[in-house]
Amino acid sequence: MPALSLAQLVECTGGSLLRGDPATMVATFEIDSRRLRPGGAFFALRGTRTDGHEFVNAAARAGAAAAVVERPPAIGAETPPALIRVASTPEALTRCATFVRSSFRETRWIAVTGSNGKTTTKELAAEGLSASRRVHRTPGNFNNRLGLPLALLAMPDDTEMAVIEIATSGPGEIAELTRLSDPDIGLVTNIRAVHMDTFHSIDDVAAAKGELFAVMREEAIAVVNLDDAQVRVQATRHMGPRVTFGQHAAADLRLEQIENRFVPGAALTFQHQDRSTRVQLRIGGAHAAFDALAALAVVVAAGEDPLAAAERMERLEPGAGRGRVHGLARGMQLVDDSYNSSPPALASVLDTLKLSEPRGRRVLVMGDMLELGPMKTALHREAGRRAGAAGVQMLVAVGPLGRETAEAARRAGVGEVHYYPDSEQCAGAIGDSLGDGDLIVVKGSRGMRMERVVRALLERFGERN
């Protein structure tokens, strides 16, 4: 990872050195004092709930070499050996990341955004590219104004390919993060009506996601989903080269077939340069197969071998909460898709569940979907109706809006319906309602903490191969 002297850190942040040796080197950068490594730099950020300046003493005890602050600590307070004062610590963090980004001139940079599937696509692309290159990827959900700079500052010096995820909480953020990362390749996975607490329409969502295409350098390569009309429109904001994917006959990577299942994972067959290739994933659902196609298009845009990449993608295990399948006692199977949820993502899960033929019942444990704006009640009722149409035999609704889902599911013919006001109560009770051979899918937004349900089921029934 990049190492900077305090003199360089002062220069790139626009700050002033209050104390310390300008020649001191720092190689790690954190905003959380609990994650600091000895000799690193701590950026004291002011948040809505906590103020990082209150943890400068904790950073000192963790062995930080320097703290970047907006105001100096009180006289006599415990501090790291060096202090740098700046006007704004978030801006200083971004400026530091921009400085480091400019030093990686030989690295190919790939940016991934979209409404659904961007994390899975990022992971699949990074895994595929690692067949032939040294790859750095943004960890977890380090995809916003704070996470992305930290991901850039943690990048190993020998990185050949950097695959980064970009998210948005409002207009202009993707443009800002695109300028920071300056990608050589940019992908918008898809555009859906999500985050409707922030955006007023899908056109607003599209315009925000399309900022990636608009801001990329002209010589950068746009990776375009031809099956998504909104993506096609936004792609016209980039006048440079492109690689396309989808079922569309004109796609450079054309999807021929998807095998839509949870176990043993989805599979896809795609055609590229008149050659058909089948890819067997360990991640379930048609959405994962399409994410893999998008990732393969990124590989082609990067000039790497898609066949070698596909072989690596086949080994990738899904992350926690992102479709991981657990075998339980009594022949039950648990699909942990608890990390996030939205109407399009839920619809895709229900499509896969409908095609599944477990020995027992199809069971959906559904937490409330968040950030849906004024349509939230109607969309949760629709979720209940969709569950009935998908052949769900037991539905467990969790959260304030779950009452709407539960009632709609009963009217749609779901035979057994349960409701719990929160995930904690659900976790304590759901095991009593499950039967031999059931296929249980846990789906929910992060704020609903549906991982509690997953943990409870694993603790009660154990995990079987």
Image: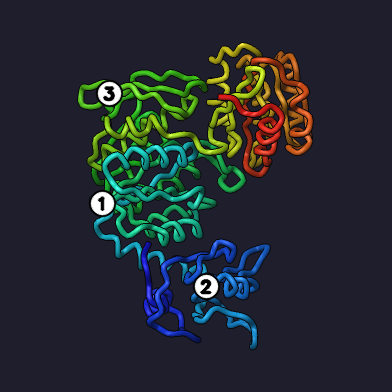
The three-letter amino acid code for the residue at tag 1 is Glu
Q: Is residue 242 above or below residue 154?
A: above
Mark 2 vs 3, N-terminal side: 2
Q: Which of 76/272 is in front?
A: 76
- Disc 2 marks a residue whose amino acid type is Ala
Residue 64, numbered label: 2
Residue drawn at x 42%, y 27% as measured from the top left:
281
| Residue ID for mark 1 | 218
- Of residues 90 and 213, the one nearer the viewer is 90
What amino acid type should be assigned to the residue bearing mark 3? Gln
SS under mark 1:
loop
**CA gap, disc 2 and disc 3:** 52 Å
How far apart, in angstroms, are the residues tagged by discs 3 and 1? 28 Å
Q: Nearer the viewer, residue 95 or 129?
A: 129
**Residue 443: where, in percent of width, then height?**
62, 32
* Residue neighbourhood size for the residue with mark 1, other residues' Cα within 10 Å, grouped as few (<14), some (14–19), many (≥20): some
User: Horizontal and vertical percent for residue 282?
Assistant: 45, 28
Q: Is residue 133 above or below residue 245?
A: below
- Identify whether 380 is placed above or below 416: below
What residue sits right under mark 3 in the picture?
271
Q: Quadrant location of residue 411?
A: top right
Residue at 62% from the left image edge and 65% from the top image edge: 47
Label number found at residue 86 = none
Q: Tell me if 374 is positioned left or right of 247 in this view.
A: right
Can you give x and y, in whole percent of width and height, for residue 237 in the image?
33, 46
What residue is at 44 percent from the left and 60 percent from the top? 149
The secondary structure type at the circle numbered 2 is loop
Mark closer to the chain start, 3 or 1: 1
